Amino acid sequence: MTGPDVAATGKGRRWPVILLIALAAAMIVASLAGLRLISEKGDDYASPGLHTEVWQSYQLRSELQRLLDTAHAVDDGQAGATSLILRLGVMRNTLDPFRHTPVFDYLPQPRPEVHETIERLDSLSAGWMQRLNWQDQASARRVAADMLAELPAQLRPAHDLIVVSNIAVAAQLDRERQSLQQTFHWLTVTLMLLACGCLILALRILSSQRRSQRLAGELQALNSSLERRVQSRTRLLHEREALLRTILDSTPSDVTLISADQRRVFYVSDDLLTQTGTRRAEDFHLEALFDNGDDYRQLVARLGRGETLHQMEARLCPSSPYWALLSARPLRIHAQSAWLIWSLDITRRKAMEHELQQLASTDALTGLYNRRALLRAAVMQLRRERRAPLSVLLIDIDHFKRINDEYGHPIGDQALRALARQLGDLMQDDALLGRIGGEEFAVMLSGMSPEAVALTAERLRAAVAGAPLIVNDDITLSMTLSIGLTQRHESDSLKSLMMRADRALYRAKSEGRNRCCHLPPVEFTPSEFDEI
Amino acid sequence: MLRPLIVGVLIALSPLPVRADEPPYPADMPLLTLVDSRGQVLASFTLSSLEALPSREVTGSIPDTSDPEARWSGVSMNVLLGSQSIAAPDRMLAVGLDDYSDIIPRSDLEHYDPIVAYRRNGQYLAVDRYGPLVVMYPYTDYPELHERTYYSRTVWQLSELQLQ
C-alpha cells in the first residue's frame, strides 16, 4: 500500500466516526428535549386541574334563584337583612371565579354576551352589597325590591352562561387533550429516533467487534505462522550448531572459541574442560589451561594484536602437563571479537623428537655423548662461560683390540660400559663425558685448576689399573688407560684444544701407556698446527 | 410569586392594625352549627365563641381559585369537637352556604388536623370572599394533600358540620 492510499483510507474511515459522533450528539439533544418536554408537561399536571367552571355556572344560576327567593322573603317580611347579605355574598362569591377565569378564551367562537352577563351581575350585586347593612332592615327591603325587578331578567343569561361554560370547558379539555397527544407524538418520534440511534450504534458496535475479531484472527494466524517460521529457523540453527559441535567434538585437536574479553565461552572441547578441572564451559578460563603463564601471556598479546598464530608449542594442563601445538586466530562472532584456538597434543611427537635427539647425540653403547654431541656441548659451554678454565681429558684403553680378539666383542662392549660407569662415578656432575672413538673417551671439565684435573685423571687411571673388571662373574679383565690432558688457552679454538689433548694422549701412549700426560696451555700458533 | 411574599412581609411587619380590623359581619352571628346524624343541632358557634377556643394556624390556599398561598388561622376540628365533648365521628359532612358539601373522614382529623379558619393572613373573611369560615388543610406541610380528594374537602363558606 502506498502513502496516498493509506491517507485516502484514513479519510474514508474518519467519516463514519464523525457521523457516529453526530448521531450520539443528536440522541443526547433529543433526549434532553424530550426530558424538557416531559418536565414542562409534568409541571402542568403537578396539581389537580381546574375545570370547575361548569359546576360554578350551575351554582351561580342556583344562587341567583335562591337570592331571588330570599328577596321575595325579605320583601314579604319573612326574612331580614342578614339572610339577604349572606345570599348576596354567596352569589357574589360564586360569581367571582368567572371574573378571572380564562376558560372562555378556549371557545371556538367568541361569546361576548357571557362577559356582559358577568359584568352586569357583578355591578348589580356590588351596588346592592354597598347599600346593605347587617342591621338596616329598611334598606334590605329596598334592595330586595330592586332585586325582584332586576334578577328575573338575569336568569336566562345565567342559563346561557352554563351552556357556554360547558362548551368552553369541553374545548379547553380538548385543547389539553390535543396538546397532550402532540406531546406524545413528539415523545414517540424522539423515542423512535433514540431507538434508531441505538440500533445504529449497536450495529456499529457489532461490526466493530466482528472486525476486531477478524483482525485478531489474522493477527493470530500471522503470529502462529511467524512462530512456525521462527521454530523452523531455530531448529535449523540448532541442527547447524549440533553439526558444528559434532565436527568440533570429533576433530583430533581440542578447540576453544572464546570472546576476546574472555567473558564468554562459545565452545570448548570436553578434553580441555577435563584438563582444567572445569565442569561447565562458562567457567572455563584460558589462563588455567597453561602450565606456563608466559606462554599464555604471549598468546593473548599476539591475538590481541590481531595476529594469527601457527604452530606455537606450549605446555598445557598444569596438573599433568603435556606438550601441545597451538594454532590461534582472532575472528568475529555476533559482531564480537573472538579467538579460535586449536590445540593438538604433541606429547608423543615431542617424545619421539626427544628420543631422536637422544639417539643423535648419545653413544648407544655407553649412554655418553657421542663425539659430535660432546663437541656441541663443549661449544655451548664455551659460549656460556667464556672465561672459565676448561680442561680436556682424552682417555684411551690400552690394547683394547686384544680384549676384543680374546673374549669377543660383547665382552669388549661390557668393558667399555664399565669404564663409562666409572667415569660417571668419578667425575664431577657438570663434567661433559663422551665416547669419541672405538675405545677412546673424552671428558670436559670446567672451573677446575690444572692440578685438580691432573689429580682426577691420575685417580681415574689408578682406579682402572688397580681394579680388574669382572665380567659375567668368570672373566677378569685387567685394563689400563692412557690419558692425555690439557687446558684451554684463551686463544684456543675447540679444534686446537682437542688437537693439543690428542697430542698429549699420543705422548702418553708413546711414553709407554698406562699413564697420564699433561700438556700445559700455550698460545695457539699455526706453526704448531703444522707440526702435527 | 413576589406578591404573596410582599403581602406576607407587610402582614408580618404590621400585624396589629390588621388584627384590629372589625369582622365584615356581626361577631355574634351564628356561623357554624354542629348537627348530629338525625338533624339534631348539637352546638352553634359565632366568631366570638370560635375565637375563644385555642387557635391553630396552617398555610395553604383555596383550591380552584387563583388565590396565592396564605396563612390561615382558626380552630382545629379536633379542638372544636373536643370543646363540645364530642368524640370524633367516623365521617363529618361539611356543608357550605352554597349547599356544597363533602365528607371529611376521621382519618383526616387524625393525620392532618384540618382547621375551621376565620382569618386569612390575619384578616377576617367576608362572605363574598369565601368567608366567613373555610375548612383548610395544612397543604404546605403535607404536599400529598394536593389531590382532588382534599381539594373537594376544602369547603369554603362553611356553615354546618353534620356528624355521621
Image (cartoon, grey):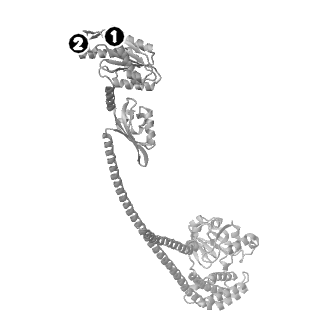
Residue A97, how many percent across, how many down?
Answer: 62, 81
Q: Which mark is residue A406?
A: 2
Q: Nearer the viewer, residue B21 or A409?
A: A409
- Element carrying mark 1: loop
**How far apart, in angstroms, are the residues tagged by discs 2 and 1?**
22 Å
Which of the two discs, 2 and 1, labels the residue nearer the N terminus?
2
Chain bearing mark 2: A
Which picture quadrant has residue A377? top left
Q: Which mark is residue A158?
A: none
| Amino acid on which the number 1 mark rests in the picture | Gly
Which of the image's four quarters has the N terminus of chain B? bottom right
Up/down of A126 relative to A337, above or below: below
Residue A518, how many percent across, how many down?
Answer: 40, 14
Question: Which residue is at a point 71% across and 88% down the rendered structure image?
Answer: A142
Q: Which mark is residue A512?
A: 1
Which of the image's four quarters has the C terminus of chain B? bottom right
Chain bearing mark 1: A
> In the drawing, does residue A379 fall left or right of residue A180?
left
Which residue is most to the top? A466
